[in-house]
């Protein structure tokens, strides 16, 4: 198979289970020629270290949405605590697929699971087009005010926003997740010198709105 679908189902169930429902952004699934990605907000609990993520050897010590977890268990979509990652890795191994990649940032604003396509799939093979997440009016407004490279405070001032948390949750995070803007210092999201700029995708989005 192109992808280990049992592993993808488990990752999607985990995204629904562990996301923060006070954040409006939905779980995002993208189907690309080279990979399938699942993105949820926010990122994993800080009990999971970046090193553990890179080694694919982690178990969450805290659980969000316990009632949702119980409901998913009744539907036989989840088995219990600490079973998700082993199930994903077993399914990937059975399918002969490359191991998945688990990504977050230092601020744990989002969590992305990447499933690379099976190595035996020809590069020219056609697959389902990318599922593009909804771009909200807030994000579009943000794209319109960015000129070159701008800091957070500059962008907020242009938008007339004073609440940093509101800006990050409804403007900055969704725009980064959708690939419409990028950080100039991606390895240090909270750097005082951090700025944002439009990506090629962000510029094309603006052109399509004109």
Image (cartoon, rainbow, N blue to C red):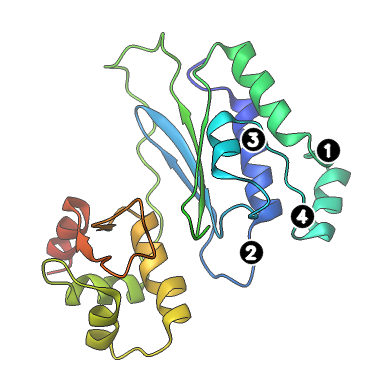
Precedes in sequence: disc 4 or disc 1: 4
Residue ID for mark 2: 20
Label 4 crowding class (10 Å Cα cut-off): few <14, some 14-19, many 20+? Answer: few
Q: Is residue 22 above or below residue 132?
A: below
Position of 24 with respect to 131 (left or right) is right
Query: Element at badge 4?
Result: loop
The picture quadrant where one finds residue 157 is bottom left
**Mark 4 or 1, closer to the camera:** 4
Judged from this view, the residue extending furthest toward the top is 120
Secondary structure at numbered mark 1: loop
Q: Is residue 169 above or below residue 59?
A: below
Dot 3 and dot 4 residues touching (CB under 8 Å): no
Q: Which residue is mark 4?
A: 62
Judged from the image, the secondary structure of the residue bearing numbered disc 2 is loop
The secondary element bearing badge 3 is classed as: helix
> Rounded to the nearest whole Å, what is the CA distance between mark 1 and mark 3?
12 Å
Mark sitting earlier along the chain (2/1): 2
Q: CA distance from mark 3 to mark 4?
A: 22 Å
Between the residue at mark 3 and the residue at mark 2, the CA separation in whole angstroms equals 19 Å
- How far apart, in angstroms, are the residues tagged by discs 2 and 1? 22 Å
Q: Are marks 2 and 1 in contact (CB under 8 Å)?
A: no
Q: Are marks 3 and 2 in contact (CB under 8 Å)?
A: no
Density class for disc 3 (Cα within 10 Å; few <14, some 14-19, many ≥20) is few
Q: Position of residue 99 (x, y in %)?
A: 53, 22
Residue at the image position 25 percent from the left and 79 percent from the top: 155
């Amino acid at each position: 198979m192109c992808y280990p679908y049992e592993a993808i189902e488990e990752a999607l169930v985990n995204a629904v289970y562990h996301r923060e429902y006070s954040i409006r952004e939905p779980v995002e699934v993208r189907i690309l020629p080279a990979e399938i990605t699942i993105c949820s907000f926010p990122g994993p609990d800080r009990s999971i270290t970046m090193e553990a993520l890179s080694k694919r050897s982690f178990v969450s010590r805290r659980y969000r949405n316990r009632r949702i977890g119980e409901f998913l268990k009744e539907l036989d979509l989840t088995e219990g605590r600490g079973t998700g990652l082993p199930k994903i890795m077993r399914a990937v191994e059975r399918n002969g697929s490359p191991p998945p990649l688990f990504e977050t940032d230092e601020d744990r604003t989002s969590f992305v699971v990447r499933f690379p396509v099976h190595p035996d799939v020809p590069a020219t093979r056609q697959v389902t087009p990318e599922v593009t997440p909804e771009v909200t009016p807030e994000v579009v407004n943000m794209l319109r005010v960015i000129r070159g490279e701008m800091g957070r405070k500059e962008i907020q001032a242009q938008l007339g926003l004073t609440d940093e948390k509101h800006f990050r949750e409804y403007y900055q995070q969704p725009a980064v997740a959708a690939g419409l803007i990028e950080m100039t210092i991606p390895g240090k999201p909270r750097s005082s010198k951090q700025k944002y700029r439009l990506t090629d995708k962000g510029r094309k989005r603006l052109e399509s709105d004109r």
